[in-house]
Image: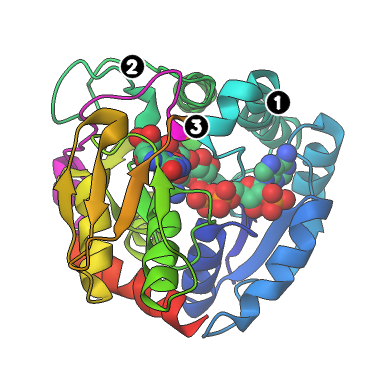
């Protein structure tokens, strides 16, 4: 039986990946810090099977605990998903973000070396490494230009992972993941905030949702598809780096329109910038802009070209944006 260690098991991707690996007969050990335990054990309520066999303690900000976890579990495959994953929070907590995301990844890599472990390593990298994009769409060869502490931390982690592959011969992969969502997305991310609000507005418990930059563009996919390709990378004959994306650009405004449509509310847009509003058929403002949600810096035309993953790994996304919106709205209606 293959033993996998998943850092960040209590997060969105941890749930989908743990469930996938268990369905493939893996023994899944989830690494959690204290805070994550409650969330990890709550997740089995989400329809389907428990997503791990057992949990172990590991704090990415602490080298000793990471080394202990690796030494005790001695996994065959490590899927490193644990991170301070909020871009917006990284502007107010840059040092913590660097410690967890950049140094945390290095601590894991060093622990593998320390224990002379013969294992494979997957690192969850991010499209935020491209930041002020140097070309559209972005591929594995697009130059890095991160614009947030989070993006910088993920750039460090990607380069370190590459270095351990090239210098120390570790089977190591970077998944350069573009945004991927699901009903398990935390409420602070824009897709979940919008789908929750659309449902609350349709049910009459909320009047208006306040958002930041409606012109921001993202390449949104489905988390269930993205964990499939993480596993595929680790089954390939050598470790490598892959862009994982749908190739479709959508603005926050378009996502909001789709979510409101899904609950039977059609929006008309008027005004510009902070004055812009999404208004329903009764003339009620359902979407408004609040500068509170603007960022010190925004990333540009984020859209990925996943041709390499299509060709080398045979991966294709199975859920398109409309299906994703439906799925998130259905879950919000159920909750
Ligand atoms: P998520 O829901 O925020 O989950 C992250 C997990 O990391 C949480 O379970 C959290 O545990 C854990 N964690 C945070 N700090 C930790 C620490 N100091 N020590 C140990 N564990 C810690 O993130 P996700 O959406 O599943 O994303 C998974 C990975 O993919 C992350 O590395 C993220 O940066 C990356 N990524 C995600 C996307 C996306 O669109 N979802 C796109 C690109 C890259 P607690 O519960 O204790 O807080
Ligand atoms: N969160 C949030 N809240 N974002 C808003 C809002 C709002 O009210 N209004 C507009 N936005 C815009 C943000 O400015 C950003 O351009 C876009 O919506 C997406 O924001 P988030 O959903 O917070 O995600 P993110 O793209 O910053 O980060 C996610 O994707 C990255 C990959 O590109 C996270 O999952 C990261 O961990 C991941 O690496």
Q: Residues within 10 Å of mark 1 (few under 14, many from 20)?
A: some
Residue 292's label in the rendered image is 3
Look at the picture and state if 253 lies above or below 280: above
Q: Residues within 10 Å of mark 3 (few under 14, many from 20)?
A: few
- The secondary structure type at the circle numbered 2 is loop
Task: Write down the quadrant of residue 92 in the picture.
Answer: top right
Query: Can you give x and y, in whole percent of width and height, for residue 45 in the image?
Result: 62, 82
Looking at marks 3 and 2 on the same chain, the residue that comes earlier in the sequence is marked by 2
Could you tell me how many numbered marks the image carries? 3
Please name whichever residue, 39 or 57, is drawn nearer the observer in this view of the structure: 39
Task: Write down the quadrant of residue 232 in the picture.
Answer: bottom left
The main secondary structure of the magenta stretch is: loop
Distance of label 1 from label 2 (alpha carbons): 22 Å
> Label 2 belongs to which residue?
144
- The secondary structure type at the circle numbered 3 is helix
> Label 1 belongs to which residue?
96
Please name whichever residue, 189 or 163, is drawn nearer the observer in this view of the structure: 189
Q: Is 315 a magenta residue?
A: yes
Query: Can you give x and y, in whole percent of width and height, for residue 76 in the image?
Result: 60, 54
Q: Ligand 2 appears in which quadrant?
A: top left
Task: Write down the quadrant of residue 193 in the picture.
Answer: bottom left
* Residue at 69% in and 24% down: 99
Magenta-colored span: 293-318
Please name whichever residue, 160 or 335, is drawn nearer the observer in this view of the structure: 335
Which quarter of the rendering shows the N terminus?
Answer: bottom right
């Amino acid at each position: 039986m293959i033993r996998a260690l998943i850092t960040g098991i209590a997060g969105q991707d941890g749930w989908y990946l743990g469930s996938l690996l268990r369905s493939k007969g893996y023994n899944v050990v989830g690494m959690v810090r204290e805070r994550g335990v409650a969330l990890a054990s709550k997740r089995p309520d989400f329809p389907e099977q428990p997503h791990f066999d057992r949990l172990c303690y590991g704090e990415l900000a602490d080298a000793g605990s990471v080394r202990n976890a690796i030494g005790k579990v001695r996994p065959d495959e490590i899927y490193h998903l644990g991170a301070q994953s909020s871009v917006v929070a990284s502007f107010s907590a840059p040092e913590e973000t660097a410690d967890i995301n950049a140094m945390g990844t290095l601590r894991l890599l060093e622990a593998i070396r320390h224990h002379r472990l013969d294992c494979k390593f997957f690192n969850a990298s991010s499209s935020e490494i491209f930041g002020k994009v140097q070309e559209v769409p972005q591929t594995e060869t697009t130059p890095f230009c991160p614009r947030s502490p989070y993006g910088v931390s993920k750039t460090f982690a990607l380069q370190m992972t590459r270095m351990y592959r090239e210098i120390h011969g570790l089977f190591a992969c970077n998944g350069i993941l573009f945004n991927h969502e699901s009903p398990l997305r935390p409420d602070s991310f824009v897709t979940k905030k919008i789908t929750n609000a659309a449902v609350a507005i349709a049910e009459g418990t909320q009047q208006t949702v306040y958002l930041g930059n409606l012109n921001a563009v993202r390449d949104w996919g489905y988390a269930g598809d993205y964990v499939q390709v993480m596993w595929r990378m680790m089954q390939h004959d050598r470790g490598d780096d892959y862009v994982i994306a749908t190739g479709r650009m959508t603005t926050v405004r378009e996502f909001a329109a789709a979510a409101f449509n899904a609950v039977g509310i059609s929006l008309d847009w008027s005004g510009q910038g902070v004055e812009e509003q999404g208004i329903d058929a009764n003339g009620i403002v359902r979407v408004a802009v609040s500068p509170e949600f603007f960022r010190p810096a925004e990333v540009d035309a984020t859209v990925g070209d996943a041709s390499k993953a299509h060709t080398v790994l045979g991966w294709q996304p199975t859920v398109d944006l409309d299906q994703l919106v439906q799925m998130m709205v259905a879950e919000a209606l159920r909750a």
